[in-house]
Image (tube, rainbow, N blue to C red):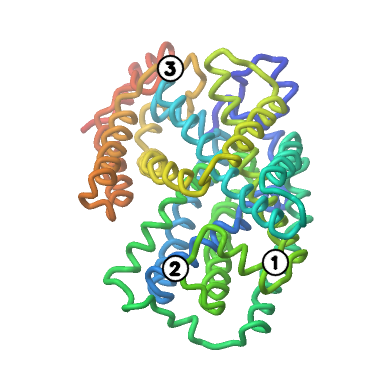
Amino acid sequence: MPGSFTTDQPAAEAADDGIDSATHAIPDAGRATRGSLTMAWWGVCSALFYIFLAATLAVAYGTVDTLIAMALTIVTYGLINGVLARSAIGNGLSVSLFSRILFGRVGALLATAIFFLTAIYYAVFEGSVIAVAASQVVGGLSYGWACVIVVLLAVPMVFGSVQKFLDKLNGLLLPFYVLGLIAAVVATVATYGYSNDWLTYTPPGGAPAGGWFSAYVAYMGVWVLMMFTVDYARFGRHTDVRYHSRFNFGIPFYLMTFGANGLVGIFLVTSGEVATVSETAVVDQLITVLGGVLALLFIWVTQTRINTANFYLATVNMQAFFGKLGVHLRKWIWAIVVGAVVLVMMQATDVFSYILAALTYQGIFVTAWVGIALTHVLSGGYRRMFGDAVHYHFDEVPNVNPAGLTAWFVAAGTGLTMTLTGVGAAFAPVVTVLLSAAIYGAMLRVARPTWYATGPAAAAARAAGRAPTP
């Protein structure tokens, strides 16, 4: 759905920040080449978090159930993100701008805040992994000073744009990441020997009933990658939509992200006979089998690649959020602010536990957002009202969109209640996404143009008789 590509930013700010800001759509002239966007995006696949998550699930539910969950996750992510990538390429909108259509001005601010906070939390997690490894390997380096070094190295990396720096950096580091995965497996075999037992590993007492479903739900906690997809895919060229929707943001990407990383994580932990998987167990195991220097180099490569995405998305979405509150600063200044916030949080006590708890609750809002966004793209209800026009500018949308906000708050509220009370908590993410999609789909059938646009745009839709019929 093509739309107009004027900026919501002040002219000076837009010129200074190029086309990377989340506050305006990406014009055709600002789109990235196929290879450039691929290299930039595939930096997201190399987080140790994916290795750690698969290892944790295998120890809890067994290898077989974890592999089933991984396979279902890869298909789910590939299909959903393929749809969202196609939509983002079509209109060039960021999560912040797309959320204006779904929720109105007020709801869009909330969605943008949740997005940049989640990206910050992941930056803290991944950055802390590097700091832990560095403090263990480098003699005399404390964890606190390691955190400072990690942030000082990370912040300048997002001063550049997606297609002018992040693609080149991640392209350069990609071979080292792949070689590191291979080296970790080879070193583990050399250290402990090889046995097929890791493929049938079960926790003491046997695998719990329905473990595959619990593991699948755990992977839903990373559905923020759907938001990541939108903010990256909007840089794709229209001529490359088939490639991006099917390969770059589709199933092949998640075969690497969850499949390859997950298999390595399960193999490392079960082969090394690690009975309890802590947040640093994977780091400890890598240091054991690779040696300190090589392990630190591999960890730095993997975490630097993923943190380019975390810091970049936190920066541009923080800029979009505070820009609408009247605080207009350059992108590089917001990058420094993000770095400062990340550093403070990395220094906090028990950083892993409170970050994972926060992500659990924010994940409920994210899964509800995905259900609404996917329904909006697939339903065709918006197109029936406005044709090919896309109204997303701040002065074109109302403060509140009843359809989106009702679906979001009811679904997220239900999911949070289930999580907090423990009543059906294991099903909370699934219930949340299905409920948000169902409510939004139902309300979209009776929606009015004024729910989505104000002024001439809504009047034109009414005059054309495009309001959906029940």
Three-letter residue code for mark 1 = Val
Q: Quick check: 453 above or below 405?
A: above
Quarter holding the C terminus? top left
Say which residue label 3 marks.
457
Residue drawn at (47%, 62%) of the image: 74
Residue at image position (65%, 43%) is 237
Q: CA distance from mark 2 to mark 3?
A: 44 Å
For the residue pair 131 and 118, the one nearer the viewer reads as 131
Q: Residues within 10 Å of mark 2 (few under 14, many from 20)?
A: some
Q: Is residue 380 above or below residue 203?
A: above
The reply to whether discs 3 and 1 touch (Cβ–Cβ < 8 Å) is no
* Secondary element at image label 3: helix
Are circles 1 and 2 on residues that touch, CB within 8 Å?
A: no
Question: Residue 343 in the image: x percent, y percent?
Answer: 64, 37
Asked if the residue under mark 3 is in contact with the one under mark 2, i.e. CB atoms within 8 Å, the reply is no
Residue 338: give x, y in percent of width and height. Answer: 63, 32
Classify 10 Å Cα crowding around label 1: few (below 14), some (14-19), many (20 and above): some
Indicate the amino acid at tag 3.
Answer: Ala
Query: On screen, 301 above or below 109?
Result: below
Give the label, 1 or 2, closer to the camera: 1
Residue at image mark 2: 71
Q: Where, by quadrant of the figure, is residue 147 drawn? A: top right
Q: Which mark is residue 111?
A: none
Q: Residues within 10 Å of mark 3 (few under 14, many from 20)?
A: many
Identity of the amino acid at label 2? Ala
Mark 3 or 1 closer to N-term? 1
Q: What residue is rendered at 31% in x and 78% in y?
A: 205
Q: Position of residue 392 (x, y in %)?
A: 49, 24
As drawn, the label of residue 178 is: 1
Q: CA distance from mark 1 to mark 2?
A: 21 Å
Decide which of tag 2 and tag 3 comes sooner along the chain: 2
Relative horizontal placement of residue 15, taking residue 423 as reference (left or right): right
